[in-house]
Amino acid sequence: MVATAPRAAVRKRRRPSRESDTPTVGRSRVGTIAANTLGVLFAIVMFFPVYWVINTAFKPAPEILQFEPTFFPHTFTLDNFASAFNAPFFKQDLLNGVIVTCGAVVGALVVGFLAALAIARFRFYGRKAIILVVLSVQMVPFIAILIPLFLMLQKASLTNSLVGITLVYIVLILPYTVWTLRGFISAIPRELDEAALIDGASRFQIFWRVILPLTGPGLVATSVYGFIQAWNEFIIINTLNDQAHQNLMAWLLQNQTSRGTFWGPLMAGSILTALPVVIFFLIIQRNIATGLTAGAVKG
Amino acid sequence: MSVVDSPSAPPAQQPSASAPADGRARRRRRSATSGGFAPLALTLPAMLLLAGLLGYPLVRMVVLSFQSLGLRQLFGNLAPDNVGFANYVKIFTNETFYQVVGRTVAFTVVSVLLTLLLGLGVALLMRRVAPSVKIAMIVAMMFVWAMPQLVATQTFRWLVDSDFGVLNYLIDLLPGVDFANHSWFADPIQGWSVITSIVVWAGIPFIAITLNAGLTQVPKELLEAAVVDGASAWQTLRSITLPILKPLLIIVTTLSVIWNFGLFTQVWGVRNGRPEEEYQVLATWAYSTAFNNNNYGLGSAIAVVTVVLLLGVMAFYMRQMFRIGDVD
């Protein structure tokens, strides 16, 4: 990264004359070079922390613990990943995280799709109120709910259980799910419903055979965002559950307090924890644009 | 993040949705009267879940804020004592409260302004650089955007580590500066600049990429006309670009205010779950009061005050979103 940057900047310098998509005419050559340099600098500064995590995770401990850092691992090692993976509760919390997150995504998707259908395709008394609820609930800081939630779930013996936290996570991602799916459903032309209706389809068939398949890309995008939200959550699960019933994000927090100085395993653990989210995010970022446009045209 | 696509997507559907509205409204009304229970049945599961796990706790929070509930009541299985406004009196007569509110507001203002200015700058810069540089910028921002908050916080904790952090090493390279073993959290101002950096660094991609998308809506002809008329770059920005970006700017600003006002993760991670007094903001204060000091009533009261303080901003945001939601 550091090594290739200057070369990239030089290569850019030869190009300005070919740039036809700049919005205004009469841009100076110096200005373009300055802009490109600034852009490269910005990319380096932004990416540096990400790079530093990766760099640290592959170094052996003695190389990490020196004042003059090495900008790439001189001795390449996977030990940090091994010790993170074998650390207490890592595997347990990884499994918990997968179960809880997937459960919450599926739950929110089913419940949210039905509600989104109602909001997008029906005019009914209380529709505005429901939109208002869905929107306002999204804004409530979850920390505020946490105190009564903790007391409630404790009384219902749902703390230290994966069921309780899954329910909480469904509610956490439900408002967003309803709101986004509503957008996807109302993007489907109503004429399709009507055509199916004329062909003798029942209302249920319209939902099942017309709307659901066309919402496909929307369902994927929504579930991935829901996955990211639930996977990244750690405050609620850290408060409600003990370490045997937590997820990886909470594990990362516990790990920090008990063994804060072991930077290698911590960074390796961070990579393992962030990996699914980063991958999903990068995938969805490309798909969401095509999903929004292609989904409508293909239909 | 969660609303990026919602505000930008609906305007495109606007014309098709509103044009045949007349004939359709009648049909819709008919279908609503015939299948009257269908929509309510469809929304019922969602509403039950939201009411049970969000609505009820919200009410409980308000009730709790008028009660005293600690470990004694919790483990003794006793009913919480009603204490009236005692919790609120305790908050409003407490010097700490005003400091915490001041700190939260100051952090919100500074971090939102920085994120917006830098984000806008980057969005404008992305239009001037070569395509390959633009891709490099986008890739870097995507990674930052995708990074979970807690992981980002851990990363920065490592970057500014007093003994082996790379930041101290790099600053130490400057001639005449000794930054070896410099602790960034001993002085709250330095500590807060680290926290602000984490938040701003993580916040730039959303703002920059959203605004860059918005910038494509600025008509090229207008900008060219302005150049021909002899407008300076600053004048063009102020009188053409910014007014067109205004609706988008309002939404991203409101969202940033809501997010940053509820700052929790970064402080929590950086201070190992036990923030000192100089590092407390409203959210962490409410949490530590309730769960670290086992004073659930007082914690709830702080949470209520936090929500009330945010209510104005939320109402503003919802009015914007509601307008969009009403379109179809």
Image (cartoon, coloured by chain):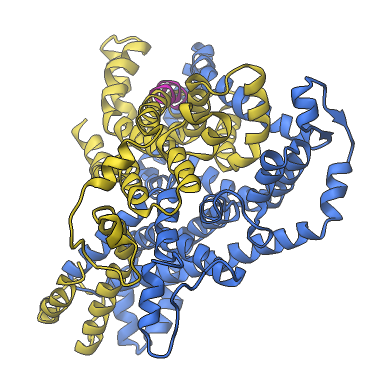
Chain colours: A yellow, B blue
Query: Of A45 and B259, which appears nearest the observer?
Result: A45
Q: What secondary structure is the magenta-colored segment mainly?
A: helix
Q: Quadrant of the N terminus of chain A?
A: bottom left
Q: Which residues are magenta?
A: A106-116
Residue at image coords 21%, 83%: A33
Rendering coords of residue B274 (x, y %): 61, 50
Q: Which image quadrant is residue B222 in?
A: bottom left
Residue B295 placement, left or right of B223: right
> Would residue A204 be counted in the magenta stretch?
no
Q: Is residue B326 visible?
A: no
Residue at image coords 59%, 71%: B189
> Would residue A115 be counted in the magenta stretch?
yes
Q: Which image quadrant is residue A138 in?
A: top right
Query: Of A119 and A277, which appears nearest the observer?
Result: A277
Residue at image coords 68%, 50%: B285
Q: Which image quadrant is residue B14 in?
A: top left
Rendering coords of residue A230 (x, y %): 43, 35
Indicate whether B242 appears above or below B257.
below
Q: Quadrant of the C terminus of chain A?
A: top left
Most extreme residue toward the front is A62
